[in-house]
Structure formats: C-alpha cells, structure tokens
Amino acid sequence: MHSVLLIDDDHEMSAMLTELFKRESVELTVVDDGVKGLDAALNGDFELILLDVMLPGIDGMQLLQRLRQQHRDTAVLMLTARGDDDDRVMGLELGADDYLPKPFNPRELIARVRALLRRTPNTTMQSEKLVASGFELDPAKAEVSCDGQALVITPTEFDILRCLMQQAGQMVSKDQLSVAALGRKMGPFDRSLDVHISNIRKKLPSRPERIQTVRGRGYRLTAQA
C-alpha cells in the first residue's frame, strides 16, 4: 500500500478521506496539528504529504518551509482556500509540488494523488540515465546533478527536468510539461509551471539561462554541455 500523510484539522474531512483512500490502496496517517505534523513529516516514511494551509501550532506555509530546509523532498500537495492565489503561489515557491483549492471534488483529489504517487520509482519508469546541458539525471535512483553538484529538488521539479532533458534543444510546450510533471493540462491562469521553473533555476550552481523561456509557448533546455 502507498503511505500518505494528511495534516489537516478538519476531522470530518479527514475521516472521509481515510475511508476513501482505503479503496485506493493508500494508508492514510492523519495529524491535526502543525507542530506534530512537521515531526511526522520529518521522521516518518511517507510518499506524499497532503498539507492544509490553516493549521493550529504552525501553519502550513511554515511547516513546508521547515520541511524543505531539512532537504526532505517528499511530494507535497497543498490544500488551499479557493480563490486565494497568493497562498497557491507562496506554497509553490516554498517547494510544494501542486495545490488543490478547498472545497474539492474527492475524485479530483484522488486523481492528483495518483499523479504524484506515480513518481515513485517502478519498473515501468525509463531507467537509462540522461545527460544534457550539464545535467545528469538518474531515474532509477531519482537523483539529479548539475555541473557535478547534486541538486535537492522536489518530485515535480525532477519530472520537469526529465522531460526537458529528453528533448534537449527543442521547445517543450507548457501543456506537455504540465501533463508530464503534474498529470494535468494547465488552466488558463495557472502559474504552477512558471513557479516550478523559477525554483529549478534558483537551485542551479551556474547558468540558470540554460533553461530558456519560449515566451507564451513553453521552455527549452539548451543542447550544449
């Protein structure tokens, strides 16, 4: 079974999701406090964390920031208030892999969870190492380096880089990248992909411009080493 951590103080929703995830072969651990949630996230072995923004103790943004400061790269799906774009962008900038506004359709949550859990290494994943533009990416180990320096990146950032490296030198559309990395097409005002690309560039030891923006269309990884 997959192992997922839910950090949310809505007990009624948590009980509903516990039953829902059982049918999806997902073992859901529920914590209703930010401080206890951070401890569980840092010390537990979870494939995915579902993280509410509004929490007692410490809020979801603080929790996520501390989690990423500890170099924990567990996938994180933020649960945000509907229409609060600032929370969504802030969560992505702090290292969330994706977000879902509340209230949400349970089937949409399941679809997002499935997309994130698919990043777990498995036998169907391309196993050959990729080398392009100073990057070396090992899908089997879920490791990536740039100019010989190991990068600490989120699962979504890993999938974006893998997609760009597979087509190095070519423009990759935003929709193609979004499907590959987030498991869904982009919405008309969706800034998720742009924030993830910005986060990747900030982590590079040099030459962030090697990931080029093709304005209004997509991104390109330069072909040179």
Image (tube, rainbow, N blue to C red):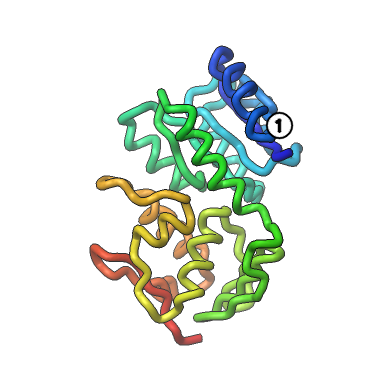
Residue 186 % position (x, y): 34, 50
Residue 194 % position (x, y): 36, 56
Answer with the quarter of the image where residue 100 lies.
top left
28 horizontally vs 185: left or right: right
Which residue is denoted by mark 1 in the rendering? 27
> In which quadrant of the rendered image does the N terminus lie?
top right
Q: Residue at x 56, y 23 (%)?
A: 8
Q: Is residue 150 visible?
A: no
Q: Secondary structure at mark 1?
A: strand
Q: Residue furthest top?
A: 12
Q: Residue furthest front?
A: 23
Image vertical order of residue 184 relative to residue 32, above or below: below
How many circles with numbers are drawn on the protein? 1
Q: Residue furthest bottom?
A: 224
Residue 120 % position (x, y): 66, 52
Other residues around mark 1 within 10 Å, as few (<14) / some (14–19) / many (≥20): some
* Residue sitting nearer the eye, 20 or 157: 20
Q: Residue at x 67, y 43 (%)?
A: 47
Q: Residue at x 70, y 61 (%)?
A: 123
Image vertical order of residue 84 relative to residue 151, above or below: above
Answer with the quarter of the image where residue 11 lies.
top right
Image vertical order of residue 222 relative to residue 182, above or below: below
